[in-house]
Image (cartoon, rainbow, N blue to C red):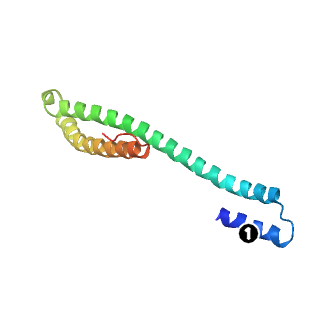
Amino acid sequence: MKLNNALNLKCLFNWHGLCNDKITKAVIGVVMGSTFLEQVNYSVESNSLYYRLLSHANKVLCISVFGVLITLLISYPYAGYFSIPVQIFAHISTIVLAAIVKVSYVLRCVAQHGLGQEVR
């Protein structure tokens, strides 16, 4: 779109007899330069988005894996030390935290793919 604007300005300068190679190059350079800068800014913004996504996904993944381990310990080997409501909560939490582990792992893979890293 901006390239079309630059070409329209070049035609306008030619039509009015104002065309000077320096003016035309300056106008096209400004318009094309702003397009280039927008692409660079978009790339930097998307990379920072992927870095933040990777950071948050890693944190959530670690916390949820730790939570699953705790709830499994409460649910099975140490169930005799906890009341029935706590055991019920631990069983339900195991299912919910397992789902959070899966979602955070998928988000981690998306972020790695977006950053061009090896997805593992």
Q: Position of residue 73 (x, y in %)?
A: 18, 30
Residue sitting at x 17%, y 34%? 75
- Is 91 or 10 nearer to us in this picture? 10
Q: Is residue 31 above or below residue 48?
A: below
Residue sitting at x 67%, y 67%? 4
- Is 11 or 109 nearer to us in this picture? 11
Farthest residue to the bottom: give it: 15
Q: Position of residue 1 (x, y in %)?
A: 64, 65
Query: In the displayed structure, does residue 22 sit left or right of residue 69?
Result: right
Query: In the displayed structure, does residue 66 sit left or right of residue 88?
Result: right
Q: Position of residue 108 (x, y in %)?
A: 36, 42
Farthest residue to the front: give it: 21
Question: For residue 58, what is the image quadrant?
Answer: top left
Query: In the displayed structure, does residue 69 sit left or right of residue 36?
Result: left
Quarter holding the C terminus? Answer: top left
Q: Is residue 93 above or below residue 25?
A: above
- Residue of label 1: 8
